[in-house]
Image (spheres, rainbow, N blue to C red):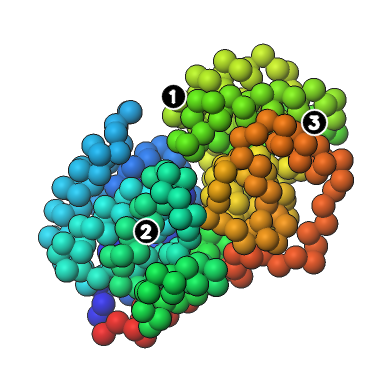
Amino acid sequence: MLKILVCFGTRPEAIKMAPVIHELKNQKLDFKVCVTAQHREMLDQVLDFFEIVPDYDLDLMQPNQTLNELSSKILHEIDRVLGKEQPELVLVQGDTTSAAIVSLAAFHRRIKVGHIEAGLRTYNKMAPFPEEVNRQLTARIADFHFAPTAKANSNLLKEQIPKDQLCITGNTVVDALQWAIKKMESEPLSQEIKKIKASLKPNKKLILVTGHRRENFGEGLINICEALLELSKRDDVELIYPVHLNPNVTSLVQELLSHKKNIHLIAPVSYPTMLWLMQECNLIISDSGGIQEEAPTFKKPVLVTREVTERMEGIEAGFSFLVGTDKNKIVEVANKILDNVLDFSGIENPYGDGKAAFRIVEYLKNSIE
């Protein structure tokens, strides 16, 4: 039987890998799970929620470590795991440092690599940084490319990836959302959600904000905060901002926004709480790739505070609006959306139907001897 090692390190990866892990288990394939723990607390919350117990936990997160420090640790530690397990296939996800370096380590040992969420591109190596290069490096190494959309598949074909290595699957984030929503519906509201709910005024329009991209550190983040301050002048809105733990984000956001009564700066929230906030809000302002993919499930508009995005499907479908870090543009588009409710009822989710994990596992079973 095919022996698989599933590797990831961050919360977004864990969310998107969870449906694949459940499907591997359902179909009784031989696999083990290794986490680099590039994130720690945020990763552990998702592992608990999706009931995933790693076989290997490299526990590599350190405060303020550089990308090179992290990369060298991953390369060293994953080599030990690969040597012990000797898998025939390593599965990685997306665009993280964990995905790129684990892929490289597997290649060095002549182990096949499957890349989930392959083919997203901006073709600007500095945006998103370092994710765009991570994705392209992983694509050059991978033997099997699981593209979430036709556009991503087309990118890979243009890069001369052999057609028989490609499979369009949909994005596993939709699978994860469907699983999570079903679980949340069967459970009472968490204390975290109850606390946030009690702090919000129900008759106000809610703007959910997130931000963590390296390319926005400094001036870009200042511009975004100034836009949020301008939007907070409306008497019909409240803003809630789970502030990323990165000190480049935390210190600046607290300095600029903490004095406004209708801007709620809170600690990073658990995955189910973030889903609840997405359900409840009227508008999302974010630089997150995952949120761009998740919002269509909830039929919520997203202002993407990036200059470019590798997720153009949401833009083209009308769910997302690329506004960069231009204060005036953010305010202008946000006000238009807040004043004119958008109707997404007839628009299909451009990121899939919730069956991506099944397609991935079926492909692996049928394609690899």
Which amino acid does the dot numbered 3 rest on?
Val
Three-letter amino acid code of the residue under disc 2: Gln
Mark on residue 322? none
Which label sits on residue 136?
Answer: 2
Q: Quadrant of residue 87?
A: bottom left
Residue at image position (62%, 30%) is 224
Residue where numbered disc 3 is placed: 237
Rendered location of residue 353, percent (x, y): 61, 70
Question: Tag 1: Cα neighbours inside 10 Å, few (<14), some, or many (≥20)?
Answer: few
Q: Mark 1 sits on what residue?
A: 247
The spot of residue 238 in percent (x, y) is 75, 29
**369 or 44, which lies in front?**
369
From the viewer's perspective, tell me whether residue 60 is left or right of residue 19. Answer: left
For mark 3, give the secondary structure: strand
Task: Tell me if residue 195 comes above or below residue 68 in the rendering.
Answer: above
Indicate which disc, 2 or 1, sits on the residue closer to the N terminus.
2
Q: Secondary structure at mark 1?
A: helix
